Image: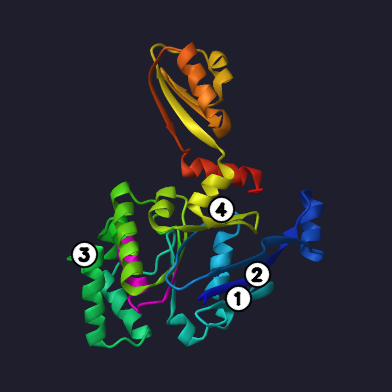
Amino acid sequence: MSIITVENLKKVYPVAVKEPGLKGTFNHFLRRTYRSVEAVKQMSFQIAPGEVVGFLGPNGAGKTTTLKMLTGLIYPSGGQMQVAGYVPFRRQNAFLQKITLVMGQKQQLIWDLPAIDSLRINAAIYGISDKEFRYRMAELVEMLALEDKLHQPVRKLSLGERMKAELLAALIHHPQVLFLDEPTLGLDVNAQVAVRGFLQEYNQRYGATVLLTSHYMADITALCQRVLLIHAGSLIYDGSLTGLLDRFAPYREVKIELKQPQAATELSAYGELQAIEGCTVRFIVQRESLTATVSRILADLEVMDLMVTDPPIEEVIGRVFRSGTVD
């Protein structure tokens, strides 16, 4: 059984076309013409209750557009979808009680008021009683480590504290489905770790379903077993992170520490050069030729240290996006 079902989802935007110059401006006012831009193209996937799924793609790939359709903020141009048993664009009250959308670059808390005041407003909107509000507040505040912060004006909170307060406001009604768009955007490393830990605990405690977009691969590797990759509006991969590595990274990363620096022209014979920093060199080597290549390196070069690892997941996904396919 799926809590999120998407079938052939599509979104097309009409974009006005304007020719340069005065004549173009004049025609733009009198006889405006448009071209169609497909932001999302025939996308289909399903997500089971309790899953935490990473939704990845380069800027402009259609991630935020998809999230806005799934939350009912914009109307799809085609296809069908259901979230928690509801059609999102109908925006029924029962549906809104079951979801939340957090956007790292947007805020819902009132800047000059203490965060607790905004939280009380949210509780009133969702019809949460005072007793239940206090109980949920105590629980979430403990999970987020926000004690003594909610009575300060929002503008006096650090960026990390503000993001935690935004999460608290978005989760005060205990939604079943969380749509998170760059929730750790701009946060320092410690704040990112804290937000990841909270989301992991919230998912485990309440069985909430999470669809997460992020440009920080640490968010994805820490929280998600499954990823959806979107490129130019099309879904190009749906599966595990491990499966993505096995399918799209038939190579290993070889890192060596040389006794003395070598020219790039001499080193390029051993594999695809990724970086040279003094005596430290990183190669990409195909798996089938790994043993032979390492033997050549050890025989030909003065090697002080050598390490063989899988390539970083962000490099693998970057290659997927650059090619636009996983085939």
- What residue type is disc 4 on? Gly
Viewer-nearest residue: 30 or 277: 277
> For mark 4, does the 10 Å Cα neighbourhood hold few (<14), some (14 to 19), or many (20 or more) residues?
many
**Counting residues from the N terminus, which is met first, the one under dot 1 or under dot 4?**
4
Q: Secondary structure at mark 4?
A: loop
User: Which residue position holds label 2?
Assistant: 9
User: Which residue position holds label 1?
Assistant: 81
The answer to the question of whether label 3 and label 2 lie on touching residues, with beta carbons closer than 8 A, is: no
Instruction: State the separation of the CA atoms marked 2 and 1.
Output: 7 Å
Instruction: State the separation of the CA atoms marked 1 and 4.
Output: 21 Å
- What residue type is disc 3 on? Lys
**Counting residues from the N terminus, which is met first, the one under dot 3 or under dot 4?**
4
Q: In the image, which disc is placed on residue 149?
A: 3
- What residue type is disc 1 on? Met
The residue shown at (30%, 59%) is 197
The answer to whether residue 60 is magenta is no
